[in-house]
Image: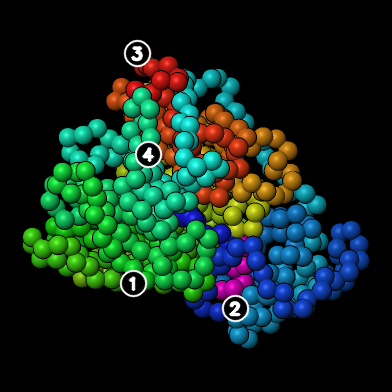
Amino acid sequence: MTGKRLPRRIRNGVWGTLAFLACTGFALVVWRAWPDGIGWQKPPERSRNASSPNVQDSLAESRIVAFCSDCHPMPRPESFPRDRWHKEVQIGYEFYARSGRNDLDPPPMRQTVAWYRSRAPQEVLFSKPKEAETPLGVKFSVDKLPWTGPKGQMPEIAHMRLARLAPDTRPLLLLCDMRFGNVWSVDVRHAQPYPKSLARLKHPCHIEPCDLDQDGNIDLIVADLGSSRPSDHDRGRVVWLRSADDSSSMEEIVLASGLGRVADVRPADFDADGRLDLVVAEFGHYQTGRILLLENLAASKEPPRFEIKVLDQRPGTIHVPVHDFDGDRRLDFVALISQEWEHVEAFLSRPGGRFDRRVLWAGPDLTFGSSGIELFDLDRDGDMDILYTNGDAWDNMYATPSHGVQWLENLGDVRFAYHRLTDMPGAYRALAGDLDLDGDHDILVTAWLPPPVMPGGVLAAPLASIVCLEQIEPGEFVRHTLETGSPYYATFELADFDGDGDLDFALGPGPHVANASQKSHWLAVWWNQTLPGRKQSGSLR
């Protein structure tokens, strides 16, 4: 939150990445505050299309391209409307001025502004994706859970997960609440469900169930950002919520602290020694952020004890799902690394605790706005594919036409083919499952956008907030928009909540937009009506 989280960083636009042109170790995460000490004044415009002889000069253009693409693909002029490029260029030059780096040859700022403005559209156009010609073979009834806590202070949900807290109990919906710091559990089948606090942390943003100490009880591993807004600090943590024998309480044990903002943690036995290790996405901010391995060194029957190993020094990692991708019976993981990289990379486990890094796919430029990945065998051919969303508009409060959903199809030998599935401003979370019970995987996607999202063109029609991509043939999807006008969902969970054999889903307002919707409910459960004998909306069971 992902994310975001925020499991996903909130950086300040395309030109924020020139920080990396400026100095090593700086991530490109910026909230909306910029110092005023550069002293640059906006140059006068000569014409509406902002062209000038200097911009057309090939030498000037070569300097601009060299300066703007030194360590990442050239930012594309069509990513922002013409009137935004003054600010984007100013941000980049401010970063460079602070960095102390002097090995580049920056062109005059007025030339760079003119170059981008002359190539940028007056207005950024957003496509209108085609909707399916036939109705989705699924109908939902929706139950909305009213918030009975303090008025105007609803939880802000960063992650959800359906899991059992004890082996012989029914699953509960677990939630990370960024506003109050709670890890909640809620029984959505109860007649009057209300969240129960399992722990009060700082800013939990991702949760994973496991039996970390191998005592037969189900524990929870939580990624704690340590702050809601991005900043460089050492308050990020990895927290173990250890289940007691009677399952009535959970003990909070900090496994790693003094970290940057931790966005994701996944348990796995990477060295095949019978003990769970932890791979950690430390998203960070400017000077913090890495990928870490917490290697479990505990002897048999000892409590878990971890040694931290740094696997990657780059800030900006969002998710690190685990799978054996090369078939060597060693667990690997995939990392979604944002900032100026916008990469999906495999970390392939090797003997001796090493990992080989391989880029599986790289975004076209740093405006791509990666927001999340999950692993599914989407085409059911026996190998694991990657479902990938890009819809981060918290960089600079701008959505771009590149936002949407893609499928990285596993071709074998750790090779993947890229398939664009749909455009969707703010696409943030996607999960797959057989919603219509026809034997293949469909995809559910939600959007999370800042309330004052720009540019104005993106608001020309109600924004899709929940979309179903129905798989009608292997690898062929059609789009059904289930809800518009409420792009507030940083996360959701797709699962069979009531045990009747079909998939339901639940969602709620994400961080920083919980009050924007002006809703009275804090959680909505969409009950799948595909199979007979269903409940009617308004009466949870």
- The mark closer to the camera, 2 or 3, is 3
- Sooner in the amino-acid sequence: mark 2 or mark 4: 2
Which mark is on residue 233?
Answer: none
Counting from the top left corner in percent of width and height, residue 126 is at 69, 43
**Magenta part of the protein: which range?**
12-22
Q: Badge 2 local density, few (<14 within 10 Å), some, or many (20+)? A: many
- Sooner in the amino-acid sequence: mark 2 or mark 3: 2
Relative to 167, is 340 on the left or the right?
right
Residue that numbered label 1 is attached to: 310
- The mark closer to the camera, 4 or 1, is 4
Q: Secondary structure at mark 1?
A: strand
The answer to whether marks 2 and 1 mark residues whose Cβ atoms lie closer than 8 Å is: no
Residue that numbered label 3 is attached to: 533
Counting from the top left corner in percent of width and height, residue 424 is at 59, 41
Q: Secondary structure at mark 4?
A: loop
Residue farthest to the left? 300
Residue that numbered label 2 is attached to: 22
